Amino acid sequence: MRTPASCRHHVAYPLEIWRGTLVLRPAGDSVGFSATAMSTELARIRELAKSPDIRHLIVDLSNGNYFGSVVIGELNQLGQVVRDRGGRTALAGLSNDMHDVVRVMKLDNLWEIHDSLPVALRKIARVPIWQQSLWILKPLLAIAVLAGVVALGIAIWPWEFHERKYLAELEQLTAEFEELRRRGVSDSEWEIFLTKSRKALEPMVEHLERYANGDRPAARYLLYASRDFCMATFMARAGEPSRMEVPYYQMLKLTRDHLRLPQPPSRVEGGTAPKARAPKTPEPETPASKEPVPADPAAEPPTGTGTAVVLPLSFPATSRPGIPGIPSKATAS
């Protein structure tokens, strides 16, 4: 089945060509169309009917309940052109009113009458019903294939794209958090930032909880950072460090390592957040006459400074801390 390029925009007389058979589908009576448009389209159709590629003519009248004498006269002249060349002509899909018109005008002596277009195509153009159905369903099949390709693309979309996107969002929020904490902003500004952070984290956590698993370590680290540590870290103000702050920065570092991204300069060495300063204890005054006692080289260095933080790759559901503003699945249920 094909439609010539010159006839693809027909409005009054759309047409198709099936195995050398010209199929016309009049859209309605002449009252609904301009005379100029109809005459222009009919002129193209006459030229097409004279082509040696066209052997037969089928007119499908199922688009209207009644067609006046103008349309019937034009179609009869077109049918005569095909019959003069030894072709067959047929009318299909006639309403009860059109059956009466055809019988009164004795057109049934010139035209074959068929109940429907598929029947006419099968008997005149020798087109099987299954092939007609395939052509009719072709646009629907194309849409279904396109939808399947889109769904498959979404399903296998590189997860690294999502991981890099979420990491960039978390690091942007973290940079704002560090800047606000450095400036010591007011409570109102801090609340605005926390509200913004919650809105950004909610869809991220929902997505990561569905898809983060053992096959995607970076996604799992991002889930821990966004769900378990991020808001607890952001709610800590200057001078009030959170115990979640070090694990949060460590999750970001592990994510960058897994994605083979360079670490920011502030995290290359330690991989941790700025640590809270411990209160200084006054040192006992020593007499000026006494010399300071040198440190024992064999003594062990004090613990708690310069040590690397080692975190497990998974956290039991019962040990995960609750995050203010973002309820976990267990809490929600």
Image (tube, rainbow, N blue to C red):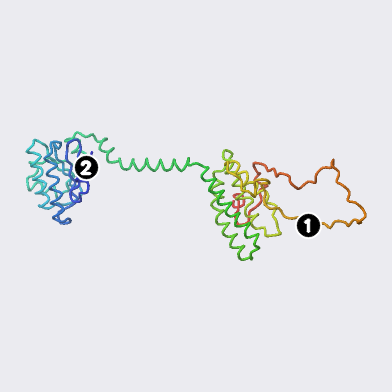
Which mark is first along the chain, 1 or 2?
2
Q: Percent from the top left, x then y, of residue 233?
A: 65, 54
Q: Which amino acid does label 2 sit on?
A: Thr
Q: Residue 235 appears at what percent x and percent y?
A: 65, 58
Residue type, numbered disc 1: Pro
Q: Which of 219 and 31 is in front in this view?
A: 219
Q: Position of residue 152 (x, y in %)?
A: 44, 40
Query: What x and y, as percent, mark residue 106?
Result: 7, 45
For residue 214, what is the image quadrant? top right
Q: Residue 108 carries which label?
A: none
Q: Distance between the residues labelled 2 and 1?
A: 86 Å
Q: In this view, does 89 lie above or below 104?
A: above
The answer to which image quadrant residue 50 occupies is top left
Which image quadrant is residue 4 in? top left
Which label is found at residue 3?
A: 2
Residue nearer the viewer, 157 or 15? 157
For the N terminus, the quadrant is top left
Residue 325 position (above or below residue 25): below
Badge 1 element: loop
Which mark is on residue 279?
Answer: 1
